């Protein structure tokens, strides 16, 4: 059995690796076609991406991406396509920022309160899609996309002076009231810039994610629904309840996405709060195969590519080229996983057949010789 | 390796049967012959000419056509449209095609009406459409993959008549089956496959089903032991006046099940006969709690479970061998030990509190694999990589591992080889002796008659007839299944003496021995007349009085 597993691991790694290599090749072709030297561009990215300040940037960025990947992956494990992670995290971060700015409590109370608020808001927003799906049969893809737009509108409405927003001292931008010092999350005093302490929360979230799925009854039920809804129902899982529950959890996880930025960096929710991370999360969850370790690697890769893209501009390349790389990676990964999955299944079937045939022949030979 | 050293010669103008256990390699061989898979070595010759098929198109060009076990027809198209689909170039899609279909249909007595929608056709008619489809494409050799699995006895006879017509016209039929009685009645030559290789040929004129079964299994079949009936007076599952409806998209309320009333006692096997699609699946789902009842009461072990969720019912001792194991019984891409957890995640040894206990679950999976003879190289392989019979053995092992009170067995031996079949019957009987109540639903009438203590016939969502398995024959049951007979089915007197049927006729295809013991020893190859006193006990339990 050991051998089986080793080969399976190899297969699992082969797919994303292949996808990344193909993505770089395609990008090289694109660069060459536009009359630019491709390999120099890659060299710039790698050189710049491995500098120490880049490393800090990548870790901080990856923290956010990791949480986004997890939030999406929970849905994927259930066969639910939670596109609404984007709206969920923005709405969650906005209300959490507003709450945090309004209170001044000891950090040990205030920080958990802010995080809890974000998780609840995210869960509620995702829950709407879950409830709509089980009661009215609305596809979660459609409803979550629409909820994204609604979230944008709600934030736009509330983030105004006199509502939940206020002008900064320079009078140039509107944001929520800044969090008090006590609500700042701890940092690792690395040089040249600090690594956000929220990376610890992200790691814990990854471990909880893994443990829940692999080691609890609930996780088993959830995976069962994802693999076969009909088998899950026959096995006694309440599929509808499971859909709502997993949407709630996915939304709660989405609520965490904005927290590293809010608690470690911006300390307020303004017009410059990062957007679109929910969609990045989809790419990363795909890349990481909904596996907590894979998602971590995907998040790091994504952050690395983005870091490299900034430098490209200074060297006369278009930074959009990184978008091409990312896009091609996702495409390749989806294809590669499916190919590898089918190949793996077939291969195992063959191996099992061969082993059984060998066993059968052995026992027959023994019978004959006996 | 699914096949090795296969040697088979099929004579033109004959029906050649290919038999073997499930997983023996019949389907792989057929795929090779039909060009869906390429052989690693060896040659195929058609009419003395060596050929290689790289896709089904090549095979069709050589006059080889395949009728699949699962029909490949579009329900909302007419027969004509289905037939011409993909072969529009042959005779167009209009009157010329219609004329050709008529011609083929008349030539072979297929009785196909070209302008009917396929959704309005019964199973047997659909099968004839499939055959016609293949003939339309010019096939001279037909491969039929388990064509009788879905048919009632009368339909099987009609199919065999069609096959004889085809043969008379000089066509060749390769007939895959593991129903030995049928094979003997229709085949001219028989080739037996075991473990991926041809192990022998047989002449149907002087071979018995028992000999065939032994060739297939490779060893002598177990001999039967006669046992007492185990039916008790203690009701285990009571179904009272159960009614289930469904609303169509256009708002019409149809009744799926109506007036279902029965009781299964401890130690009793209640068999439900019926053509598929007459409400059996719905009945199973209703009892499992997957559907909301319109009305009626279900009680298990004297406790009303009508409103309990599926999981609770399972924990309370309801075991299920589902009709469609891929849809309802397995996670195909999950390892065996996770499949062992499926459906029993809240029970020991699979979990402790809210946490899974993978170690114990793995250990117990090893036990199931050992005790139920699941042929697998290990418990980490996916369920999809096992053959159908081994998947089923795993399911049976799993369901029997939680001391069930009631077993719902829907087609427990469908697609399962002879060896595993006998084993599954044994296990059901053994559990029944311990007081298990069994609801058995099967399309295999011999299995139903052989295992059941009581028989009921389901037709259009109602239980329309009951019968005593001790005296009923598959033919009589078959006519009740088509709605032709209702009430208590009485066998003609001479049928009762069938107890003395020689062993050879009974053998491996059902828990066979059919007419005899209403529920005694495993009887593949019953070679002793059974104790005539046992059958009676089965009939006084629930025969049909409660309607």
Image: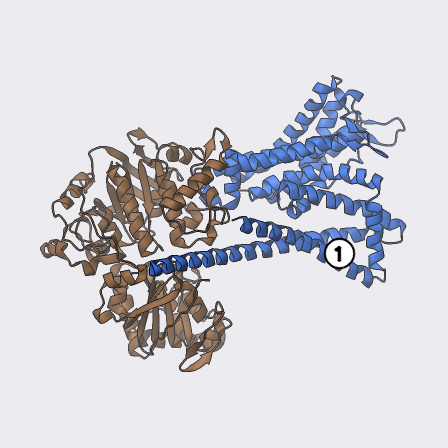
Chain colours: A blue, B brown
Q: Position of residue B266 (x, y in %)?
A: 25, 36
Q: Secondary structure at mark 1?
A: helix
Q: Chain of mark 1?
A: A
Q: Position of residue A360 (x, y in %)?
A: 40, 58
Tell which of A140 and A219 is nearer to you: A219
Q: Is residue B538 shown left or right of residue A221?
A: left
Q: Is residue B267 shown left or right of residue A36?
A: left
Tell which of A49 and A329 is nearer to you: A49
Q: Position of residue B108 (x, y in %)?
A: 31, 74
Q: Residue furthest front?
A: A370
**Is residue B201 placed above or below A87 in the rendered structure?**
below
Residue at image position (87%, 32%) is A172
Residue at image position (85%, 62%) is A35
Residue at image position (30%, 32%) is B299
Which part of the image, by quadrant, shows the C terminus of chain B?
A: top left
Residue B131 visible to the viewer: yes
**Is residue A367 placed above or below A200 in the rendered structure?**
below
Q: Is residue A77 shown left or right of residue A174?
A: left
Residue at image position (28%, 60%) is B213
Picture quadrant where residue B230 is located: top left
**Is residue B445 placed above or below B142 in the rendered structure?**
above
Q: Position of residue B247 (x, y in %)?
A: 41, 44
Tell which of A238 and B460 is nearer to you: A238
Q: Which residue is mark 1?
A: A24
């Amino acid at each position: 059995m050991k051998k089986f597993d080793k080969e399976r691991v190899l297969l699992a790694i082969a797919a994303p690796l292949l996808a990344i290599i193909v993505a770089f090749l395609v990008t090289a072709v694109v660069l060459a076609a536009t009359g630019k030297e491709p390999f120099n561009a890659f060299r710039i990215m790698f050189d710049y991406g491995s500098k120490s300040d880049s490393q800090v940037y990548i870790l901080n960025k990856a923290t956010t991406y990791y949480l986004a990947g997890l939030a999406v992956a929970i849905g994927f494990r259930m066969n639910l396509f939670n596109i609404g992670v984007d709206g969920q995290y923005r709405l969650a971060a906005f209300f959490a920022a507003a709450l945090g700015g309004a209170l001044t409590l000891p950090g040990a109370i205030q920080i958990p309160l802010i995080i809890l608020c974000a998780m609840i808001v995210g869960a509620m927003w995702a829950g709407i899609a879950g409830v709509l799906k089980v009661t009215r049969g609305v596809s979660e893809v459609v409803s979550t996309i629409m909820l994204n737009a609604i979230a944008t509108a709600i934030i736009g409405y509330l983030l105004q002076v006199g509502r939940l927003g206020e002008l900064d001292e320079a009078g140039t931008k509107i944001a929520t009231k800044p969090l008090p010092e006590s609500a700042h999350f701890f940092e690792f005093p690395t040089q040249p810039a600090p690594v956000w302490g929220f990376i610890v929360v992200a790691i814990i979230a990854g471990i909880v994610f893994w443990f829940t799925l692999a080691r609890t009854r609930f996780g088993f039920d959830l995976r069962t629904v994802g693999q076969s809804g009909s088998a899950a129902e026959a096995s006694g899982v309440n599929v509808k309840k499971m859909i709502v529950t997993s949407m709630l959890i996915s939304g709660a996880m989405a609520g965490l996405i904005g927290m590293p930025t809010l608690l470690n960096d911006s300390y307020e929710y303004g017009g410059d709060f990062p957007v679109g991370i929910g969609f990045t999360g989809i790419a990363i969850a795909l890349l990481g195969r909904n596996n907590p370790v894979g998602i971590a690697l995907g998040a790091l890769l994504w952050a690395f590519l983005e870091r490299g893209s900034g430098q490209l501009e200074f060297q006369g390349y278009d930074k959009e080229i990184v978008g091409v790389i990312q896009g091609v990676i996702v495409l390749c990964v989806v294809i590669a996983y499916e190919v590898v999955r089918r190949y793996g299944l077939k291969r195992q079937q063959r191996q099992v057949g061969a082993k059984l045939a060998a066993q059968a022949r052995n026992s027959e030979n023994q019978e004959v010789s006996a | 390796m699914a096949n090795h050293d296969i040697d088979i010669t099929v004579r033109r103008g004959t029906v050649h049967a290919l038999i073997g256990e499930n997983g023996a390699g019949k389907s792989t061989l057929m795929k090779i012959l039909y060009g869906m898979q390429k052989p690693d070595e060896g040659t195929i010759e058609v009419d003395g000419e060596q050929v290689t098929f790289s896709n089904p198109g090549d095979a069709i060009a050589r006059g080889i056509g395949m009728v699949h076990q699962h029909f490949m027809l579009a329900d909302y198209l007419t027969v004509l449209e289905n037939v011409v689909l993909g072969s529009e170039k042959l005779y167009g899609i209009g009157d010329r095609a219609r004329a050709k279909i008529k011609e083929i249909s008349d030539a072979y007595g297929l009785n196909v009406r070209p302008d009917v929608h396929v959704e309005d056709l019964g199973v047997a008619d659909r099968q004839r459409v499939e055959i016609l489809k293949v003939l339309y494409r010019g096939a001279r050799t037909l491969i039929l993959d388990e064509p009788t699995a879905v048919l009632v006895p009368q339909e099987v006879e009609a199919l065999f008549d069609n096959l004889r017509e085809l043969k008379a016209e000089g066509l060749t039929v390769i007939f895959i089956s593991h129903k030995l009685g049928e094979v003997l009645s229709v085949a001219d030559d028989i080739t037996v496959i075991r473990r991926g290789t041809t192990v022998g040929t047989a002449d149907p004129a002087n071979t018995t089903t028992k000999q065939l079964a032994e060739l297939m299994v490779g060893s002598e079949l177990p001999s039967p032991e006669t046992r007492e009936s185990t039916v008790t007076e203690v009701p285990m599952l009571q179904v009272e006046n159960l009614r289930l409806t469904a609303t169509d998209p256009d708002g019409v309320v149809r009744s799926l099940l109506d007036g279902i009333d029965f009781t299964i006692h401890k130690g009793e096997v209640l068999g439900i006969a019926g053509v598929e699609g007459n409400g059996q699946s719905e009945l199973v789902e209703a009892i499992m709690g997957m559907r909301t009842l319109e009305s009626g009461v279900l009680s298990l072990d004297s406790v009303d479970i009508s409103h309990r969720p599926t999981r609770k019912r399972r924990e309370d001792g309801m075991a299920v061998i589902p009709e469609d194991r891929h849809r309802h019984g397995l996670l195909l891409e999950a390892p065996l030990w996770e499949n062992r957890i499926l459906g029993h995640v809240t029970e020991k040894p699979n979990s402790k509190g809210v946490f899974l206990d993978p170690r114990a679950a793995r250990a117990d999976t090893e036990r199931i694999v050992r005790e139920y003879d699941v042929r697998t190289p290990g418990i980490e392989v996916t369920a999809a990589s096992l053959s159908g019979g081994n998947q089923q053995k795993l399911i049976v092992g799993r369901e029997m591992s939680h001391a069930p009170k009631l077993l719902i067995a829907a087609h427990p031996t469908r697609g399962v080889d002879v060896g595993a079949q006998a084993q599954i019957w044994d296990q059901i009987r053994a559990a029944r002796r311990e007081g298990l109540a069994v609801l058995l639903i099967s399309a295999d009438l011999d299995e139903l008659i052989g295992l059941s203590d009581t028989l009921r016939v389901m037709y259009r969502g109602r239980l329309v007839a009951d019968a005593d398995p001790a005296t009923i024959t598959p033919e009589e049951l078959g006519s009740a299944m088509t709605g032709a007979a209702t009430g208590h089915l009485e066998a003609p007197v001479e049928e009762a003496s069938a107890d003395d049927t020689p062993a050879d006729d009974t053998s491996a295809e059902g828990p066979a021995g059919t007419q005899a013991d209403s529920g005694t020893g495993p009887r593949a190859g019953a070679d002793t007349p059974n104790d005539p006193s046992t059958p009676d006990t089965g009939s006084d339990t629930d025969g049909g009085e409660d309607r």
